[in-house]
Image: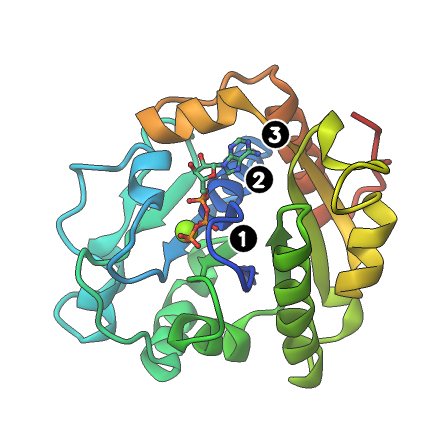
Amino acid sequence: MNAQTIMICSGKGGTGKSTVSVLVGAKLAARGKRVLLIELDSGLRSVDVISGVYGKTVYDIEDVLCGRCPGEKAIVQSPLYPGLSVISAPYEGGEVRAAPLAGLILAMRDYFDFILLDTAAGMGAPFCAADQLADRALVVLTPDPIALRDGRIVADTLLQHDHAPSSVRLVVNRVSRSSFGRDSAVYDLDECIDTVGLQLIAVIPESRELQQAGAAGTELPPGCLAALAGEALAGRLLGERIPLVAL
Ligand SMILES: Nc1ncnc2c1ncn2[C@@H]1O[C@H](COP(=O)(O)OP(=O)(O)OP(=O)(O)O)[C@@H](O)[C@H]1O
Ligand SMILES: [Mg+2]
């Protein structure tokens, strides 16, 4: 087995990278895939809470990258989403470097189908390390002009760094009926796509269930709209042709 590595990035902070990382990881795992989610956001961790591993982690990604423990010791199984394994970010930030991260990915490749790299906002060390190592990228943006403009810069950077256009996709997150229209700052999804310059792979609705489950560290109710959008995203990553449906 040879895991596919997918980075999740944004540009602007708080667009939902960690939330979408756990969502798509959970849904790939629900499809029987073995998924390792690594949070690279040193000092600002949140994946531990969203995936339910909070309080269960002894070692974090910095311990692994600094050689203080082997990768397998830092892996914690999500109690909420069977099949989803997590390596948490440290509470205090060291810099993520590409070389040891590459070593970890190499060591883990045979044991997983997908390795998800949840990066920090912007194009700092976590982004640069993931950029060098990922097979594919998901750019997660909210439908607002600043997120989209910053997303364009991130998308252009990825494409300039030899990622094939087909391997870099746009996820528009937190979409509601009021996101678009004449009175909104962004007219429609086409404007998102045109501004960022990437093909759309998923639209995730604004979801109280997703927000509450993430904040409380509880399972996302399987039938809710956000869960269905996550299932569709996972299916598309697996190569299935699933139409994007209007909310
Ligand atoms: N689709 C959604 N519906 C409702 N709330 C959402 C949705 N996606 C994310 N959120 C909320 O937005 C906030 C930020 O999400 P999250 O931490 O996943 O963003 P991030 O991009 O990882 O942030 P950072 O840049 O700090 O790493 C959280 O409170 C989360 O619950
Ligand atoms: Mg995050």
Q: Residues within 10 Å of mark 1 (few under 14, many from 20)?
A: many
Residue type, numbered disc 1: Asp
Question: Where is mark 1, residue-wise?
Answer: 113
**Display colour scheme:** rainbow
Residue 31 screen position, x and y as percent: 60, 34
Q: Secondary structure at mark 1?
A: loop
Residue 13 screen position, x and y as percent: 47, 56
The circle drawn on residue 189 is none
Residue 182 picture quarter = top right
Q: Are marks 2 and 3 in contact (CB under 8 Å)?
A: no
Task: Kindly identify the residue that appears in the image at 16 percent across and 55 percent down.
Answer: 59
Query: Is the residue at mark 3 in contact range of ligand 1, meaning its CB lies under 8 Å from it?
Result: yes
Question: Where is mark 2, residue-wise?
Answer: 28
User: Mark 1 to mark 3: distance in Å?
Assistant: 29 Å
Camera-side residue of 18 and 69: 18
User: Mark 2 to mark 1: distance in Å?
Assistant: 9 Å
Residue type, numbered disc 2: Leu
Which mark sits nearer the N-terminus, 1 or 3?
A: 1
Q: Residues within 10 Å of mark 3 (few under 14, many from 20)?
A: some
Residue type, numbered disc 3: Glu
Answer whether residue 141 is visible to the viewer in this image: yes
The circle drawn on residue 206 is 3
Residue 41 screen position, x and y as percent: 34, 60
